[in-house]
Amino acid sequence: MRVSVAGVTVRFGAVAALSRVDIDVAAGERRAVIGPNGAGKTTLLNVIAGELRPTEGLVHLGEQDATPLPAWRRARLGLGRTFQRSTLFDQLSVAENVTLAVRARLHGGWRFWPARERAVNTEVQGRLEAGGIAHLARRRAAGLGHGERRILEIEVALAAVPSALLIDEPMAGLSGAERRLTLERLQALPEDVTVVIVEHDLDAVFALAQRISVLDHGVKIADGTPAEVRANPRVQEVYLGAI
Ligand SMILES: Nc1ncnc2c1ncn2[C@@H]1O[C@H](COP(=O)(O)OP(=O)(O)O)[C@@H](O)[C@H]1O
Ligand SMILES: [Mg+2]
């Protein structure tokens, strides 16, 4: 699903968190959004997801003008997301967290239906294996390490079978080994899923993204292929040559 914002401005009082931002992500594209803290990256994801109404501008999901739609309607259109803050059910096991997400997708209801339950269990097992967390199936989410939680959050989001997925800083706070695992998982996402990822780990960004958009103080200062963005003098300035 194509994801685009056009002319989006978000003001919080005197602060413009985003100023006339245009970003157009093609169906199936891997897009990274980078920029210093406070640049407006999370605000952009909130605008796309419908958590936040822009002061000005439009949001399109596929061909549909999603600007007036609440978050749950956008989710129905196939938009998934993971949050900077965790949204797992801590008291439930890893497998139960994924099971709830699969059941929600199947409009589960509460009626027990053995054939469907078997299909759900098979799917859950497959998803846990895809995330490399099958060995943690019975563990309570509360007992997971930080990296394991992040992977589980991604699997929970994927269990909705989204057409587009917004991911906010999946690598934040992870160890080197966990970063590699998370990167591998992100690289193995289904090709037809559009991915918009906010991330500070530039190695991961350059490994993953087909295009990169750069925000600084709410303004999009660059947008292009990894090579174009790397060569952009304004981007180099913002990142003090770290790129
Ligand atoms: N709910 C809010 N109320 C007021 N200001 C906010 C709110 N959310 C974000 N901001 C401000 O908007 C700017 C962009 O924030 P954010 O999108 O979180 O940046 P990033 O994710 O790039 O670090 C910051 O100056 C931040 O303080
Ligand atoms: Mg943020």
Image (cartoon, grey):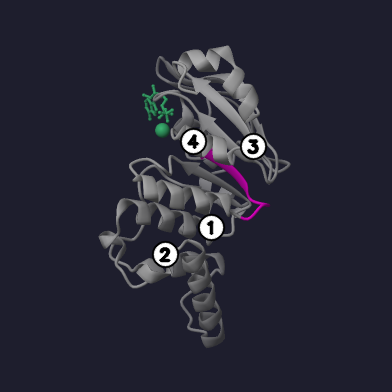
Q: Which residue is mark 1?
A: 158
Instruction: Identify the residue at horizontal 69%, vertical 42% (top origin).
Output: 2
Q: Which mark is residue 210?
A: 3
Q: Is residue 103 above or below residue 227?
A: below
First of labels 2, 1 by sequence position: 2
Looking at marks 4 and 1 on the same chain, the residue that comes earlier in the sequence is marked by 1
Under circle 4, the secondary element is: helix
Q: Is residue 229 one of those drawn in magenta?
A: no
Residue 210: % across, % down: 64, 37
Disc with the residue nearer the chain's start (3 vs 1): 1
**Left or right position of 144 against 80:** left
Q: Which residue does the numbered mark 2 point to in the structure image?
A: 133
Which residue is found at the position 47% from the left and 16% from the top?
238
**Helix, strand, or loop for circle 1?**
helix
- Give the magenta range: 190-198
Mark 3 to mark 2 CA distance (whole Å): 27 Å
Please provide percent x and percent y for residue 143: 26, 61
241 on left or right of 67: left
Farthest-out residue, bottom: 114
Q: How many neighbours does mark 4 have within 10 angstroms: few (below 14), some (14-19), or many (20 or more)? A: few
Disc 3 packing (10 Å; few <14; some 14–19; many ≥20):
some
Q: Quadrant of residue 142?
A: bottom left
Q: Which residue is mark 4?
A: 203
Mark 4 vs mark 3: in front: 4
> In which of the image's four quarters is ligand 2 placed?
top left
Q: CA distance from mark 4 to mark 1?
A: 24 Å
